[in-house]
Amino acid sequence: GGDIAGITGHLDYLRDLGITTLWINPLMENDNPEYSYHGYAITDFYRIDPRFGSNDDYGRLVVEAHARGLKVIMDMVFNHCSIHHPLMQDLPDSSWIHHFDHFTRSNFRGSTLADPHASEYDRTRFLTGWFDTHMADLDQRNPLLTKYLIQNTIWWIESAGIDGIRIDTQPYSYEEFIRKWSERIFLEYPGLGVVGESWLQKESFTAYFQGDRNREDGHDSGIPSVTDFPVHYALRNALTEPEGWTTGLARIYYVLAQDFLYPDPYLNLVFADNHDLTRYFSSVGEDLAFFKMAMAFLLTARGIPMIYYGTEILMTGEEHLGHGFIRKDFPGGWPGDTVNAFVTSGRTDQQNEAFEFLSRLLHWRKSSRAAVSGRLIHFVPENGVYVFFRIAEHERIMTVLNKNNQPVVLRTERFFECLKDFSGARDVITGTVSPLTGIEVPGKSSAVFDLIP
């Protein structure tokens, strides 16, 4: 891939697209003999990997981002590090990592921490097993290791001026450590943005790891935002499978209907794909209409939306073929690239259509209080149509997903409770104004409206 200088040189592209915050996979040194491209096998927590640049380069990236109104999130890893880290070569104490008589992999079952019937064996295997042979699993119960990781976090915040942190594999670290970390960090930086990666398939398990909740076991992570994988899975299947009582668009409905499980679902990080998942355009069979519908949902439903790089130009890639296929270079970053997707002329007509659609939504969203923080009211999907509203005082938006091949004219009396104080609707993409009695949505498409009093 590229480097920090390359990212810094293209910040204007991100700003012009409508992005507000930049999250990069870990940039810390991964000085390993092999398989170190992903950034999650750290050999020096205090040094930027020289293949990406220097600590000063990273600091300049943050400064240049701030100058353009962009924020920067740093990806931090507390659960594991490379076996080639100097600390692992000469352990300060044997209790810094988890030991086994032979290599033992985690069972990756985060559900065991919430499961009231889980065996101690399964819970222990989840927490103490290694991710892979080249990544030592850290035991944060060691007080010196806890202090080391907390101080490292504070050092990066102070030295680089970052705006937030993404915690890799949050459930895999001991919750006592995560709580100590969050208490100290928020004591020092109460306004810092923090999201924990909680890769779990079910809503209840995901909610378990969000902070500020009362739990019977007395634990509270203190982490305000978690990754909403249940929304991802619902969005992946909702548009490509037949409509049914619990299938199709109903998948999205049922996920959001369980928001009562979260202390604050509006802080959930929502996404269509990321660096570990099949790219969304591939998931929907490279169907541009379905792609647009998903982006319209993502940018108007509750939660904090995350857009994976290259989504705006319809990059493809399937996870089961290997992660290299879902983390390909963005075209145009290297001398000799045959195309340059950073500019309009370097993109195909279809790519430009996707880019413009997403860009319009992103820029509009920045000025829409309802889209960012409004209360969500949704209506049970009927006949392949899903309608929901975001409400913030006197500002209101309406999103319609029409999965049918034919256009639909909305029966607005069903939505009277959300429409009663308004007379018209302005399409945020086209600018077209329609009376509420005649809203027509084309077949297999989405529409986002600002409601007009």
Image (cartoon, rainbow, N blue to C red):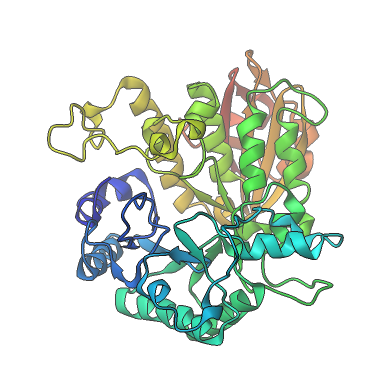
Is residue 337 visible in the rendered image? The answer is yes
Residue 263 visible in the displayed image: no
Q: Is residue 216 above or below residue 52?
A: below
- Residue at x 72%, y 23% (from the top left corner): 384
Vertical order, 273 against 8 (above or below):
above
Judge left or right: residue 12 versus residue 394: left
Picture quadrant of residue 283: top right
Residue at 35% from the left image edge and 53% from the top image edge: 36
Which residue lies most toward the front here?
A: 101
**In the image, residue 65 lies at what x, y percent?**
29, 61
In the rendered image, which quarter is residue 451 located in?
top right
Say which quadrant the N terminus sits in.
top left
Q: Position of residue 293 (x, y in %)?
A: 56, 30
Residue nearer the viewer, 271 or 405: 271
257, 201: nearer the viewer: 201
Q: Position of residue 206 (x, y in %)?
A: 69, 56
Residue lying at the far right in this picture: please name it.
Answer: 117
Rendering coords of residue 83 (x, y %):
42, 64
- Residue at the left extreme, as displayed: 335
Q: Quadrant of the C terminus?
A: top right
Residue 19 appears left or right of 183: left
